[in-house]
Image (spheres, rainbow, N blue to C red):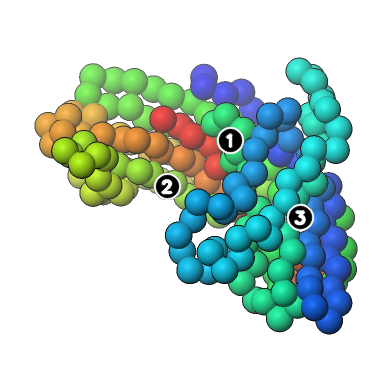
Amino acid sequence: MVRQMGFTGFKINRIQKFKDEDTQTYTAIIEASKGTVMDLHESKTDIHYKALRNTSDWKQLSMGDDVSPALYEAKITTGASELFLPPVMLTFGSQSLDIDFDPFVQSVQQNDFKFNDCQFQVERRDAPGSTTYKITVRGCVCRRSYSASVGKQTSSGFEETAGLSASYFFPMHIFKGSYRNDQTSSIFINRTALAQDSVQIRSLKFLIIREPDDFLSDLLMKSSFGYILT
């Protein structure tokens, strides 16, 4: 067992929106482990992110400890007419949370987030030449997926080449589990084929993706939780 069944390392408490003639500001209050960091998009080269540089702010509101999470405030401020809102991207250890705001919703506050009900556990089984991960998600209506950085080491550095190629990976998502509302995912990794082709896994992440429950009123357009498997 890699991880026992339990909630994610993040809890979204509140999202507020303030808009005037010149600016719009989205503020998210989030519980997370002490030491959680936010990507402020300062190093991104994409033209949209470059235009929105210095629009994100991350503040710790309470200290937290080894038992209790800390309380954080994430804030995004852009022009009032801007439709591209940079996501809040948080990371702590093997876990990450990306949240996207909806610029078209007229609501000014959201307090209920079904994402907070999501629990998951991770199991790993190793066999000669292969590894299989099984992930069980509980209490959460969501989409499940994987993301990976896979490639080869070259003279100029690591070059991504394969992604989740069928030559090396076999992912699967089903709904059957120990409980009625369980969703089970698994991914088979062919390590023999990876070694034969000199292909490396830089990272493999399992994703839990929540869409809005009410498209007319939810300020949160999408929440995407990630857990690094390897």
Q: Amino acid at mark 3?
A: Lys
To which residue does mark 1 refer? 95
In whole angstroms, how far apart are the C-alphas of marks 2 and 1? 13 Å
Tell me residue 108's x, y (percent): 87, 68
Chain-order first, disc 2 or disc 3: 3
Chain-order first, disc 3 or disc 1: 3
Placement of 45 over or under 13, stated as above or below: below
Tell me residue 172's x, y (percent): 40, 46
Q: Is residue 71 left or right of residue 126?
A: right
Q: Closer to us: mark 3 or mark 1?
A: 3
Q: Residues within 10 Å of mark 1 (few under 14, many from 20)?
A: some
Q: Residues within 10 Å of mark 2 (few under 14, many from 20)?
A: some
Q: Judge whether residue 23 can be spotted in this image.
A: yes
Chain-order first, disc 2 or disc 1: 1
Q: As rendered, which of 54 and 137 lies closer to the eye?
A: 54
Q: As rendered, which of 140 and 107 lies closer to the eye?
A: 107
For the point 60% across and 60% down, the residue is: 53
For the point 52% across and 46% down, the residue is: 207
Instruction: Name the quadrant containing residue 202.
Output: top left
To which residue does mark 3 refer? 75
Q: Residues within 10 Å of mark 3 (few under 14, many from 20)?
A: some
Helix, strand or loop at mark 1 = strand
Placement of 169 over or under 108, stated as above or below: above
To which residue does mark 2 refer? 147
Instruction: Name the quadrant containing residue 169.
Output: top left
Quadrant housing the C terminus: top left
For the point 16% across and 33% down, the residue is: 198
Placement of 140 over or under 200, stated as above or below: below
Tell me residue 188's x, y (percent): 33, 36
